[in-house]
């Protein structure tokens, strides 16, 4: 009766093997590495850089333990792993020299780093070490509040400008345009004009128009549709995140986390960074954009030789193509309210730009007489040289919304749109939470967490074996499987492990033993009643199962509540707590039963089981 | 080995009144301390800055206090923890210096460094493992790091309020969730008595924290909720037995049924809690300051958890008048052979 079909043993074996496989990466340690990240917002990192790095290392005869492309989105980097720090040091010099021909204006940032020693085939199946929280590896955590009101104001100001421009273009006379909270109010003298204005503004689909009267004046109140309002706020946060991502890249942080939290907050986590002051200054930095005209008095092709006119400057576009621009800017990035990748009428990749404030008027004035001439977009960052993003030919007079082309493909267009948006922080931000943990403290925390787990586990193991004999040993085995599976799950899911998380692992083990105690006690009880050993085992497991389910459900409720309402380290606790319950159900019931069945199941004439003393009242033993 | 050689059912319910009176007294005392002493909330709830620094030698707390007061903090809380070299500063968010709270850590570190005759220098080192480390370090004349910044935690006031609110929400969700589950699985009387018994544990843990003025942080809150779930387990196990006994022992009175249920589960109760407590003790001893209060909350919770589920939950269920009919539907009466577990 206590026999498992073969498939159940196979399931257990597979679970244990997978557990071992995914836990293994945690034991490989780390080796010295170099990380190459983009030093400029225009420099993209791809597989070509990987090849370049490999080549440089080969040339210098430096042996690397693998060069790989890492990360995704805007945090792509190339990493080269080395066997010793000596090679790492030499390689750093070589790479810096080879990748950055102009040391004063580096395109790439090379930083020393530590990379997990996981073998390549393990990385392929995503068997990675656990993702440690800041309290365990040290680093900086910021929670920033985005001033969405400011983002909204910016958007509404942009609407005001385009409304003014449209009405002027269509020659519709109004008696004033005002901005009130999140609405734009246009006053009219008569209803006829108002109707005309309505028709003229019908193109702006994100607006809701309502008629209103203010004394003798007739008004048209323009407000953003709820969806557009939400989009404007979302964009404010998203654009700030985009800007932050680019800036953080410059810090050369291994695995930065930049995420939206709630509607208007951004979390920035920079593991390993100790230089809080620098991190803060970079995060709070502002970058601006300028639109400038190309000085065509200089014959193209002779920019480098000929003298640059007094009111012009020499720039280079992309990879060293020179261009001479007027010093006066047509407008600055502050006027850009929106930039999106799109296509022009010829289906060429383009970037659509909306200007706000007086931007539209400025642009119109500047481009009216310059159709066919060239215009350049320059990105200024607080430090380093300004950079020309693109040079484009003006096709027609430009207004508050226009397109720029000449990016080649849609990917570049998307990149440029992002850049235009992320050049400067869109909305102001304030730091509302900051956490810095030194790396020494992090290592100490890991050590302490480990110690408490090991000693706790040992104490339980000794007691269980002492009290329940062989059944106790089975329980300890099940508990060990539980720990293995829990660690494997945490590694596989890459859930953030924090110190409370480690505490939760320990606690999960302490609580998981409950299921085994229940089973063992129940078996003893059945034996006490005089049941045969085989029947006692079967009944014990069966009766205990219901209770185990009940008690785990209540614990699960707690875990979920903590996950939903917790934040930071507590959420780490909650994740482990929930996972621990699931693995303990599997290991305590399924695995321990499997082991018991394997041991006792085949013995038909089982006389006694090793479960410690079964004391029956009236018998002295 | 067998610890529990119980010959007859222990008449727990006969003394239910006494135990309930003891519980009520402890509960009232806990509530009194909660209101009188208040909880010593961590900055996660109140907002503020906590800075942990380490000195080369035993730290002079008075000097540190002076330095921090010098830059505008009125009542800085400066304590040493762990060793005499480790110092923890707790700075309020109120007051003149609290206004630019986000920049507090840099200013305080600067002041501490100056007080120790050091100067802040940029340090660019590479660890022997090959990790590059750049930071502003406080160097003394001999070129050693006079003060090492270990940890900074700044929480803005709006975040604190939110965390407190979320904590209450989590507690409410646990209470409601557990009650609904128990009401479905058993009956409302059991749900009510389990929750009363276990909330009583929660209040007592909080009472301890208020009385000793231990720091109540988010991690402690997590521990309290974990204990709540854990103690509910305890009550569930006993209720399970009560139900089983109602089925098996048709003739027994409610009293006897409950007594028998508690007696037959007591050994499991003690052993399980003992095992969990071993783990928690290990955390208390080896876990360091971060896990100290976490483990402490768990310890109190586990001890009172045993007490409350054995003496309080079942007793309250009894006062609420649980009956055989509540749990066993009349339809099932026919099924005499297999009455054990559904």
Image (tube, coloured by chain):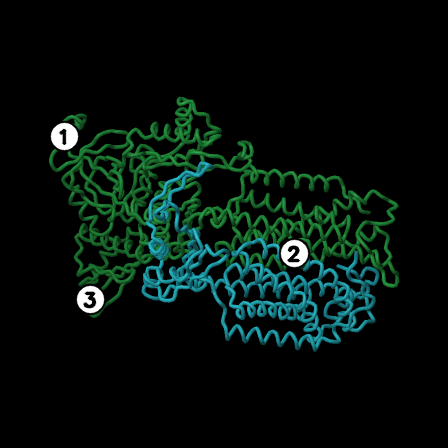
Q: Can see residue A460?
A: yes
The residue carrying mark 1 is A298
What residue do we see at 20% from left, 66% from top?
A217
**Image quarter hosting the C terminus of chain A:** bottom right
Q: Secondary structure at mark 1?
A: loop
What distance separates the C-alpha of mark 2 from that of mark 3?
A: 80 Å
Q: CA distance from mark 1 to mark 3?
A: 55 Å
- Answer with left or right where residue A331 lies relative to residue B15: left
Residue wearing tag 3: A217
| Chain under disc 2 | B
- Label 2 sits on a secondary structure element that is helix
Which residue is situated farthest in the left direction here? A310
Residue under numbered circle 2: B278
Q: Is label 2 or label 1 in front?
A: 2
Q: Quadrant of residue B62?
A: bottom left
Query: Residue A197, which numbered label?
Result: none
Q: Nearer the viewer, residue A364 or A453?
A: A453
Chain bearing mark 3? A
| Residue at the image position 73 percent from the left and 76 percent from the top | B15
Return the x and y of residue B318 as percentages of the image width and height: 71, 74
Q: Nearer the viewer, residue B142 or A378?
A: B142
Q: Secondary structure at mark 3?
A: strand
Disc 2 and disc 1 in contact, CB within 8 angstroms: no
The residue closer to the viewer here, A318 or B48, is B48
Front label number (2 vs 3):
2
Label 2 to label 1: alpha-carbon separation: 83 Å
Q: Which chain is green?
A: A
Chain drawn cyan in the picture: B
> Which residue sits at x=51%, y=74%?
B35
């Amino acid at each position: 009766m206590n026999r498992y079909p073969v498939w159940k043993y196979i399931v257990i074996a597979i679970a244990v093997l997978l557990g071992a496989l995914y836990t293994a990466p945690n034991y490989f340690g780390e080796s010295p590495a170099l990380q190459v990240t983009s030093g400029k917002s225009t420099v993209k990192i791809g597989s070509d850089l990987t090849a370049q790095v490999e080549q440089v290392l080969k040339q210098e005869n430096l042996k690397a333990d693998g060069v790989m492309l890492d990360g995704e989105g805007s945090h792509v980097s190339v990493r080269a792993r080395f066997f010793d720090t000596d090679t790492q040091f030499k390689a750093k010099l070589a790479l810096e020299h080879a990748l950055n021909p102009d040391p004063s204006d580096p395109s790439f940032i090379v930083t020393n780093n530590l990379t997990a020693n996981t073998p390549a085939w393990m990385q392929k199946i995503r068997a990675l070490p656990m993702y440690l929280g800041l309290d365990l590896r040290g680093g900086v955590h910021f929670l920033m509040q985005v001033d969405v009101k400011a983002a909204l104001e910016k958007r509404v100001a942009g609407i005001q400008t385009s409304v003014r421009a449209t009405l002027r273009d269509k020659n519709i006379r109004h008696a004033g345009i005002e901005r009130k909270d999140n609405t734009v109010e246009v006053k009219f003298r008569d209803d006829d004009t108002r109707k005309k204005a309505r028709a003229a503004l019908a193109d702006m689909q994100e607006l809701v128009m309502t008629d209103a009267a203010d004394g003798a004046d007739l008004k048209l109140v323009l407000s953003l549709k709820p969806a557009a309002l939400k989009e404007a706020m979302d964009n404010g946060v998203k654009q700030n995140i985009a800007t932050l991502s680019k800036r953080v890249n410059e810090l050369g942080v291994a695995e930065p986390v930049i995420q939206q939290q709630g509607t208007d907050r951004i979390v920035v986590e920079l593991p390993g960074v100790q230089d809080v002051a620098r991190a803060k200054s970079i995060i709070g930095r502002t970058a601006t954009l300028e639109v400038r005209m190309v000085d065509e008095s200089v014959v193209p092709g002779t920019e480098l030789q000929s003298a640059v006119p007094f009111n012009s400057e020499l720039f280079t576009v992309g990879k060293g193509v020179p261009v001479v621009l007027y010093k006066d800017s047509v407008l600055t990035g502050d006027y850009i309210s929106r930039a999106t990748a799109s296509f022009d009428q010829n289906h060429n990749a383009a970037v659509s730009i909306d200007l706000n404030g007086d931007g539209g008027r400025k642009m119109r004035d500047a481009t009216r007489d310059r159709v066919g001439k060239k215009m350049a977009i320059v990105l200024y960052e607080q430090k380093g040289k300004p950079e020309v993003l693109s040079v484009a030919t003006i096709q027609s007079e430009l207004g508050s919304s226009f397109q720029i082309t000449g990016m080649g493909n849609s990917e570049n267009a998307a990149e440029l749109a992002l850049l235009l948006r992320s050049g400067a922080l869109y909305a102001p931000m304030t730091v509302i939470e900051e956490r810095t943990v030194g790396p020494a403290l992090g290592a100490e925390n890991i050590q302490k967490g480990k110690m408490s787990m090991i000693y706790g586990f040992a104490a339980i193991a000794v007691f269980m074996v002492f009290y329940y004999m062989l059944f106790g040993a089975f329980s300890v085995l099940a508990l060990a499987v539980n720990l293995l599976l829990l660690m494997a799950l945490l590694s596989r899911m890459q859930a953030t492990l924090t110190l409370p998380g480690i505490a939760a692992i320990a606690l999960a083990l302490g609580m998981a033993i409950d299921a085994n105690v229940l089973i063992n006690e129940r078996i003893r009880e059945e034996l006490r009643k005089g049941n045969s050993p085989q029947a006692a085992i079967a009944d014990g497991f069966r009766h205990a199962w219901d209770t185990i389910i009940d008690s785990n459900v209540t614990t699960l409720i707690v875990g979920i509540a903590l996950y939903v309402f917790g934040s930071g380290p507590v959420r780490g606790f909650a994740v482990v707590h929930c996972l621990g319950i699931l693995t303990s159900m599997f290991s305590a019931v399924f695995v321990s039963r499997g082991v018991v069945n394997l041991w006792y199941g085949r013995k038909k004439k089982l006389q006694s089981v090793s479960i410690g003393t079964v004391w029956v009242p009236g018998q002295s033993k | 080995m067998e610890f529990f050689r119980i010959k007859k059912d222990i008449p727990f319910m006969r003394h239910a009144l006494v135990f309930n009176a003891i519980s009520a007294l402890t509960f009232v005392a806990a509530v009194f301390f909660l209101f009188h002493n208040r909880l010593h909330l961590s900055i996660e709830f109140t907002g503020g800055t906590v800075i942990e620094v380490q000195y080369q030698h035993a730290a002079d707390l008075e000097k540190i206090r002076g330095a921090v007061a010098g830059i505008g903090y009125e009542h800085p809380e400066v304590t040493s923890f762990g060793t005499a070299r480790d110092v923890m500063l707790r700075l309020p968010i109120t007051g003149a210096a609290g206004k630019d709270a986000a920049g507090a850590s840099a200013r305080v570190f600067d002041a501490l460094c100056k007080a120790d005759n050091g100067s802040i220098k940029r340090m660019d080192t590479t660890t022997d493992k090959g990790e590059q480390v750049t930071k502003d370090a406080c160097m003394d004349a001999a070129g050693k790091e006079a003060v090492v910044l270990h940890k900074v935690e700044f929480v803005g006031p709006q975040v604190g309020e939110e965390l407190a609110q979320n904590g209450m929400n989590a507690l409410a969700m646990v209470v409601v969730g557990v009650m609904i589950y128990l009401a479905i699985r058993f009956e409302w009387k059991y749900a009510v008595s389990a929750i009363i018994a276990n909330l009583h544990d929660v209040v007592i843990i909080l009472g301890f924290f208020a009385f000793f003025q231990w720091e109540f942080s988010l991690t402690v809150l997590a521990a309290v909720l974990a204990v709540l779930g854990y103690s509910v387990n305890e009550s569930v196990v006993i209720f399970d037995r009560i139900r089983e006994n109602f089925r098996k022992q048709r003739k027994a009175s409610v009293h006897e049924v409950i007594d028998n249920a508690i007696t037959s589960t007591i050994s499991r109760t003690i052993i399980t809690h003992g095992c969990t407590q071993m783990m928690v003790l290990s955390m208390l001893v080896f876990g360091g300051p971060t896990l100290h209060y976490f483990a402490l909350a768990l310890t109190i919770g586990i001890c009172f958890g045993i007490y409350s589920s054995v003496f309080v939950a079942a007793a309250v269920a009894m006062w609420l008048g649980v009956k055989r009919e509540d749990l066993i539907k009349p339809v099932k009466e026919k099924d005499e052979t297999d009455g054990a577990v559904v």
